[in-house]
Image: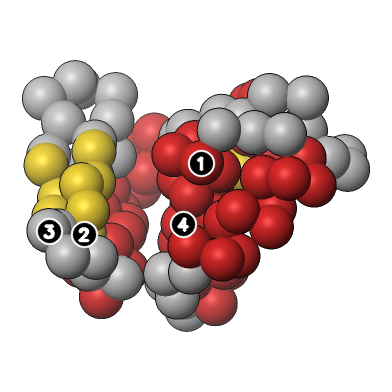
Amino acid sequence: MIPSRETLQRLQSRWNFALDPLEIVLRLGELLRAVRHDETLRDRLALKGGTALNLCHGVPRRLSVDLDFNDTGASEREQMQSDRPLIAAALERIARRAGYQVQRSREAHAARPGQTRRKKGN
C-alpha cells in the first residue's frame, strides 16, 4: 500500500524524518512483509544489517533505504547457487507486484534484484 501524503506528514511530525526517506522506509516495510509471507522466501532469507537493527529496536535514529538478506535455506554452497534463480524470481515477483521496476545487479554475490525503482505514478 502506498502511504498517503497525510500519513507521511503525520509520521514526519512525530519522528522528524524527511518525507522522501520516510516514504522509502514505509515502502520497504511493505516489501519486507511480502517476503515474510512468500512461501519460497519466508524460511530462507534472514534480514541483516542496519535496517534489521533499526526496524527491530524501536524508533530508528536514522532511516536506511535498503534491505539486505542472507540466504539461510541451504548449507551447501552448490545448493545455494542452484537455488539462487528461484530466490531471485520470487523477489522480482514481489517487487513487480508492488509496482516496482527491477534492475538486475551485475555483482557476482548478489542474488539478483539489485535495485527496484518506483514506476511513475506509484
Contact between marks 1 and 4 (CB within 8 A): the answer is no
Whole-angstrom CA distance, mark 4 to mark 2, is 11 Å
Label 1: state its secondary structure. helix
**Residue 21 screen position, x and y as percent:** 49, 36
Examine the rendering and report whether any part of residue 5 can be seen: yes
Whole-angstrom CA distance, mark 4 to mark 3, is 15 Å
Contact between marks 4 and 3 (CB within 8 A): the answer is no
33 w.r.t. 56: above or below: below
Side (left or right) of 37 relative to 105: right
At label 2, which amino acid type do we have? Tyr
Q: Nearer the viewer, mark 3 or mark 2?
A: 3
Examine the rendering and report whether any part of residue 30 can be seen: no
2 w.r.t. 74: above or below: below
Lower sequence index among marks 4 and 2: 4
Label 4: state its secondary structure. helix
Give the residue displayed 45% in from the left and 45% down from the top: 24
Give the residue displayed 28% in from the left and 30% down from the top: 110
Residue highlighted by disc 4: 27
Residue highlighted by disc 2: 100
**Residue 111 screen position, x and y as percent:** 29, 39
Contact between marks 2 and 1 (CB within 8 A): the answer is no
Q: Which quadrant of the structure image shows residue 48?
A: top right
At label 3, which amino acid type do we have? Lys
User: How many other residues sit within 10 Å of disc 2, few (<14), some (14-19) or many (≥20)?
Assistant: some
Label placed on residue 37: none
Lower sequence index among marks 3 and 2: 2
At label 1, which amino acid type do we have? Leu
Label placed on residue 120: 3
Give the residue displayed 24% in from the left and 65% down from the top: 122
Whole-angstrom CA distance, mark 1 to mark 4, is 12 Å
User: How many other residues sit within 10 Å of disc 4, few (<14), some (14-19) or many (≥20)?
Assistant: some
